[in-house]
Amino acid sequence: MTRDADRPAPEALIEDAKRERRGRLKIFLGAAPGVGKTYAMLEEAQRRRAEGTDVAVAVVETHGRAETEALLRGLEVIPRRILTHRGRSFPEMDLDAVLARRPALALVDEFAHTNIPGARHEKRFQDVAELIDAGIDVLTTLNVQHLESLNDIVQRITRIRVRETLPDDVLAMADEIELIDLPPDDLIRRLREGKVYLGDQARRAVLHFFSRGNLTALRELALRAAAERVDEEMIRYMRAHAVPGPWPARERLMVCIGTGAEAEAVVRAGRRMADRARLPWIAVHVETGTGAASAGDYTPQDRANRALRLAERLGAEVTVLPRPVHARRLADELVALARERNVSRIVIGRAPRRPWWRRLGAGGGLAEALVSRATGFELTVIAAEAGTTAAAAEPGRLQAEAPGPHFGPRELALIGVSVAAAALVSTLVEMILPLPNVSLVFLIAVLVVAVRGGLWPSIAASVLSFFAYNFFFTVPHHTFQVSRTEDILTIVFFLIAAALTGNLAGRLRERVQAERQAARRVGNLYDFARKAAGAADVDDVAWAVVSHVARTLQCDAVLLLPEPDGGLRIGAGFPPEDRLTPANRAAAEWAWRHERPAGWSSDTLPASDWLFVPMKAARGPVGLVGVSFGGRDGRPKQLGPEQRRLLEAVVDQAALAVDRTLLAADIERERLKGEADALRAALLSSISHDLRTPLVSIIGAASSLKSLGEALDPGARGELADTIHDEARRLDAYVQNLLDMTRLGHGALALRRDWVDLAELAGRVRGRLARQLGGRQLDVVVPEGLPLLHVDAVLMEQVLVNLVDNAVKHGGPDGRITIAAALADRGRSIDIRVEDDGPGIPEADREAVFDMFHRVKAGDSQPAGTGLGLAICRGFVEAHGGTIRAEAGAGGQGTRIVIRLTVAEPPAPPPEDAE
């Protein structure tokens, strides 16, 4: 998709907007110590202070230089934090104190410095990142040899390995880079004058690191890094300001990462190539199929893991391929991936030529296979350095190639038993059925070993079978001599066939194991997705997450969820965990605040035993997933690529599941809020209209009585008094309904049950509603022998009053109302029916009429009411354990309200007095 040439690039505008919201970072870049980076930084700080900027010194290393210390005068220095490590005390920058002081400009020397264990971050550049995120401008210094991609180049130039490095991408944080340059001769003169180092340290530096050749090469690297930075700034400016220029499709570079000792060197070489050509690059690794990283620091898989993490820090897109059967098959897959991703350059390592027994199982190296297949690509093969063994240094030889032979007691026992069994069976077959050749029996033994033990045990079994067949079954017997020509050909062809079939069977076994493991991973993810989808709340999701992570990665797992006050609580743990140490909780809180992984095997607070990964959803972070391998010495030093992919997949699914439950809770809250708003609006409508109407009538009648007094005849005064009485009773009924609904809503309704006769109850209802009934007829039909009702008489009377009053309002002026009762449900229940001959209730509204404030739509002649009467009836009836429903009356005319109550056991008669 193309964009208009006269419009700025949205990505560039977004990046500029992000930079405006944070502090500015300026890096003083030099080729070597002593060129004047700290001096230049302090000069700018003094100039900014003179202009009125609030400047504070977070950390500045003067190294005893008098002119540098002189520039510190007048600047506020924030005291450093003292950390203890291995019995020694070290001053470190107090990050919290700087954040609390919050100056406009902070000076932070030595950008690539590694912090003492116990600090919040592993590297000082991470401290600087937190400062600029807080809106504080920062000035800092950096030597070019500390850039990660130049680490091995600097070692070749100076023969000194720089231990403190930082990712090249960190330079992208800088808003400005100023190159501090000094010719090599001037720097050497400063060194000899004691302006860089003092005493013996200065003399050693001149003899080793600070030679003219070294400084010239480092100066060139610094100039190149600054030039590349200027070029990046120019491109960003062109994109942000829509400056016309060429926009060709960019090529890509792919780096193949293996398990050799030089894997990191291949990554750095790839990064340098990508930087020079300004290409996006991809780092590719082949999974081992073991499912777990190896323990220890220097195992092949750990080397690959470190190289992958280095590639991520250097800005590569990491891709992991499934393990193929053969290196040449891997070459085809790499070429296919390169074509799919528009890769133009492939970088791969090559080791010294391996011994024949190493090449036997591998079937040729990956580099050789790519040379013949990667047509149309630029292939760069990086050879291992001199003195590196083939076993340890082959970065291009990915895990698809066979490892060296290794036999444990199990494999040795399998080989010996299989070959011995083949010899015994061959002897029996030759005794019973003399055959010209029994070598196929040994071939079966080789296949058995290949299936059960793998490639190298099958090759060893084929060699042992060769000698066993020669010793026992060729003439002369029980010797290794061969007298017949056909026997020589037989044993030679047998050895070749056994080696080939064993090789194929062993590779097939490895492939089957890899497929099983892949199927097991997919099955585990499917099980987790099913459990997460079926989880009803956040706690169920949390338990599903931790149990799946713990079972899949063979580790301890914990899930942290946010509290309303901004803290974190443990939602679930496997095994159950209810607390974290202060160091672990600090890592979790940092990961939560910054939405980035923190803790073990990360770059932030690595001293923690747990690795915490944020669960990010559309609404933002919704929790943290933590994993721990128990702090054992044998635990992996880093998560392997397969483990990391599994953890990321589970974290993403867990975030979606938690977000789904939170969304459901939000929807429920909004629904309740909507219902509350509707209830509030209906209540206000009822108070403003239905309650105000009788009040107006009462006030009007009372005013007439007061103003006219004796002028009214007795009939008129009696009519006004009746109006006041009727409207007051009507108002009292409305208020009583509101109070009753309040009691029902708060669960404050307490039943006072007693045995009540329904006929007597209906009679009291008739008396209360005599005036409302007027000329309407109220029939009470109660069969003889009907059981007494065990109910609260007051509440049940109110139910019948509301039902009859509702029938009066909606029936005709000469209508007929019936209260009837009958046994139902085989005598276990009583149905009480209140029926009228009015217009009836539409079928669609027969359930809704029992909701609060609901009114059936009718014409303007509809009598006033709050819409609470039937809702109160339902609440009272359900409080008695009964049900209430509305249906059509007899013949489909009118309305019938049916109350069903359970028949209670009648009270026992009082005992008769004994005579």
Image (spheres, rainbow, N blue to C red):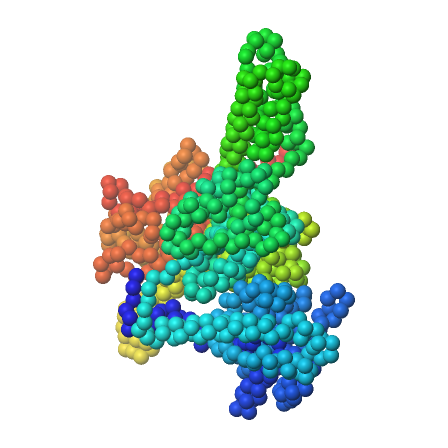
Quarter of the picture holding the N terminus: bottom left
- Answer left or right for 720 relative to 418: left
Residue 296, how many percent across, how many down? 66, 50
Q: Nearer the viewer, residue 878 or 905?
A: 878
One can see residue 860 in this view = yes
Vertical placement of 511 versus 379: above or below? above
Residue 355, how many percent across, how many down? 59, 41
Residue 35, how many percent across, how many down? 59, 80
> Number of numbered discs present?
0
Image point 48% across, 76% down: which residue?
175
Image point 41% across, 32% down: which residue?
826
- Answer left or right for 76 relative to 722: right
Q: Nearer the viewer, residue 140 or 281?
A: 281
The image quarter containing residue 487 is top right
One can see residue 447 in this view = no
Image point 56% across, 81% down: which residue?
182
Residue 501, how many percent across, how many down? 52, 28
Image point 60% across, 16% down: which residue?
483
Q: Nearer the viewer, residue 407 or 811?
A: 407
Q: Residue furthest right?
A: 87
Quarter of the picture holding the C terminus: top right
Vertical placement of 509 versus 715: above or below? above
The image quarter containing residue 213 is bottom right
Q: Residue furthest bottom?
A: 50
